[in-house]
Amino acid sequence: MAFRYRKFKVYQDALKLHSLIVRVNKNFPIEFRHLTNQMKRAALSIVLNIAEGSARFSDKDFNRFIGNSLGSVDEVVSCSEVALAEKLMNQEEFLKIEKLALEVSNQLGGLSKTLKG
């Protein structure tokens, strides 16, 4: 069985963003576990909303999940800004996350427009 979500480039890029977040978070001290957990959940939410939404029977319903993914992208970037301010990550790591998050956000926006027809 082929899963519809696998054909979307945004899904592949969302997986890359999640992987990047997991790698960067490995260096966070234990006392920032709350931030680590939130960042990972938000990054995973992007991936899962694309997958779940693609299984819906209407474009309108799928688009609602894309909106949820967009909110999670913003959450990842916001958490990354907090991590940068707390010196938990360096500028280079932050810029990598921000660049990939912007790419995913733009792709989600494009997919949303396509679904609206």
Image: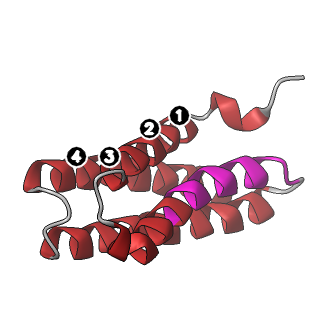
Circle 4 crowding by C-alpha within 10 Å: few under 14, some 14–19, many from 20: some
For the C terminus, the image quarter is bottom right
Amino acid at the residue labelled 2: Lys
Residue matched to label 1: 12
Q: How many marks?
A: 4
Instruction: Identify which amino acid the numbered label 1 is placed on.
Output: Gln
Q: Which mark is residue 96?
A: 4
Callout 1: helix, strand or loop? helix
Magenta segment, which residues? 42-56
Q: Position of residue 12 (x, y in %)?
A: 53, 34
Mark 3–mark 1 distance (CA, rounded to whole Å): 11 Å
Q: Nearer the viewer, mark 4 or mark 3?
A: 4
Q: Nearer the viewer, mark 4 or mark 1?
A: 4
Left-right relation of 97 to 23: left
Name which residue lies at 32% across and 46% down: 100
Disc number at residue 16? 2
Residue drawn at 50 percent across, 45 percent down: 14
Instruction: Check disc 3: other Cα within 10 Å, few if <14, some if 14-19, many if 20+.
Output: some
Q: CA distance from mark 4 to mark 1?
A: 16 Å
Tag 4 near tag 3, CB within 8 Å: yes
SS state under label 2:
helix
Dot 4 or dot 1, earlier in sequence: 1
Is residue 117 visible in this depiction of the protein?
no
Judged left or right of residue 34, residue 99 is left
Q: Quadrant of the N terminus?
A: top right
Which of 99 and 7 lies nearest the eye of the viewer? 99
Q: Is label 1 in contact with label 2 (beta carbons under 8 Å)?
A: yes
Q: CA distance from mark 4 to mark 3?
A: 6 Å
Q: Are marks 3 and 1 in contact (CB under 8 Å)?
A: no
